[in-house]
Amino acid sequence: MIIENFPADLLLGKYELKGVKAYGNKFMLTKSERLLSLIKRVSQELNISEEDLDFSENSLNRITEWLKKHVSTRKLTKAEYELKRKNIPDYIDVDDWDFDQITISNIIDVGTYFGEVMIQNHKSKNLKWTQFLRSRKNVDFGHMIIKLDKLEMNPVDLVYVFCLKAVDGRDKEDGLLGLYKIWEEYIA
């Protein structure tokens, strides 16, 4: 299931509030279906049992293995690059590529799985998904986040950054599990 027309930069602040809220509602309505689809795709491709993808911490190792094989980019057109360059300060380097739509869809699905691992392994903390709508200037605006004790976590953005590093060969060997362990420390 590919999410069509989701912005490759994941920035939702430029969209009307009605549309952003619709995204949040759709996220919640389709979350279970999308997770089941991801689990099926990963288990089939890695030739493992769906039960191995049980939202345990260690299941993130298999998700990482699968995701790294499914990160694809596309070269920006000249107009797309110029628009991207215009919106970013000159002192920041800008790549001439973005993730393709299938990769964006996978990032959202894997980010959702990552978030569910956090929620399901810390049930006593009553963690839950909520949509961040406080400030359009915040990179998390419109995204589904999880409020931890000390701060808010945007699992989709974390997976997006992980994939950026994977493209550049800077991803860590411990993958999403290592990222999970870092964020777990913010739960008191």
Image (tube, grey):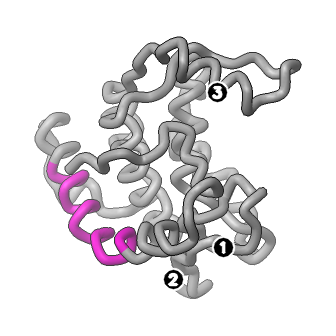
Q: Range of the magenta residues?
A: 26-40
* Amino acid on which disc 3 is placed: Lys
Q: Nearer the viewer, mark 2 or mark 1?
A: 1
Query: Is residue 70 at least partly visible in the picture?
Result: yes
Residue at the limit of the structure toward the front, as seen here:
79
Q: Tell me which corner region of the image, top left, top right, bottom left or bottom right, holds residue 66.
A: top left
User: Circle 3 — which element?
Assistant: helix
Q: Are marks 2 and 1 in contact (CB under 8 Å)?
A: no
Do residues under tags 3 and 2 come within 8 Å of each other at their CB atoms? Answer: no
Residue at 57 percent of width and 28 percent of height: 164
Q: Which residue is mark 3?
A: 84
Is 128 located above or below residue 13 in the figure? below
- Residue at horizontal 73%, vertical 26%? 86
Q: CA distance from mark 2 to mark 1?
A: 25 Å
Residue closest to the eye, 61 or 163: 163
**Visible in this render: residue 120?**
no
Q: Is most of the magenta stretch helix, strand or loop?
A: helix
* Residue projecting furthest to the right: 91
Q: Nearer the viewer, mark 1 or mark 3?
A: 3
Give x and y (percent) for residue 54: 30, 62
The residue where tag 2 is placed is: 123
Q: Nearer the viewer, residue 83 or 68?
A: 83
